[in-house]
Amino acid sequence: MTVTTIDFDARTTGIEGLFIITMKQVEDERGTVREFYRESAFVDAGLGSLGPWLQVNATSTHRGGLRGLHAEDMVKLVAVVSGEAFGAYVDTRSDSPTWGQVVTATLLPGMQVLVPRGVANGFQATGPGDTEYLYCFDQEWVPGMAGAGCNPLDPALGIAWPIPIDAADRSQISEKDHRAPLFSDLDRVVR
């Protein structure tokens, strides 16, 4: 049996506290096992303990569908489980040296993004068929919770979504996300 291992790796981005992570992966003739979360690996990489998770969501999004940009008062660990996505992240924290910065990344199975409190998270499903996206939260989501959201189509953010978005097509963008404020209209979120 041939076994291939990819080691855990966490790399910094242009947003303070936002990390792109390669999961530890072991592959053999049967398929692949990915470590979604191993506390010791996160601690050894200087990311600290992320547990316990208080809510875990999974979404299935059709190709071209866009979700976000949402910056709730919670730490998120997100990943594509199957399919492919284009992730976009915007720092909305008023006290952050990277306030207003935008980071984008192509997300494939085996990759994760650690999203700190106050950094907006959004993605567009780009693979064929549906994309399965997993979110782990350190807080339970409740209506009206602290945080911010900004319009993912805001031209000032300069996000080049790979699949053109028709703002009137609800299979591509929700009414809530389409009507979210422009980044310039946000009250700075303090973290």
Image (cartoon, rainbow, N blue to C red):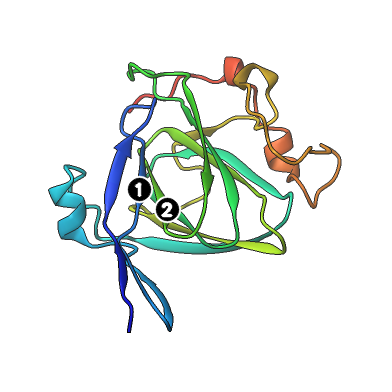
Q: Residue at x 19, y 59 (%)?
A: 39
- Proximity of marks 1 and 2: CB atoms separated by less than 8 Å: yes
Q: Which residue is mark 1?
A: 21
Look at label 2 and name its amino acid. Answer: Met
**Does residue 131 sit above or below 179 in this rendering?**
below
Where is residue 154? Give x, y as percent: 68, 24
Secondary element at image label 2: strand
The x, y position of residue 165, in whole percent, is: 79, 38
Left or right position of 93 against 43:
right
Give the mark nearer the N terminus: 1 vs 2.
1
Which amino acid type corresponds to the residue marked 1 in the rendered image?
Ile
Left or right of 88: which side holds 160? Answer: right
The mark found on residue 111 in the picture is 2
> Taking 1 as reference, is 154 left or right?
right
Name the spot of residue 23 as percent of width and height, x first: 34, 57
Q: Taking the image as drawn, is residue 183 in sight?
A: yes
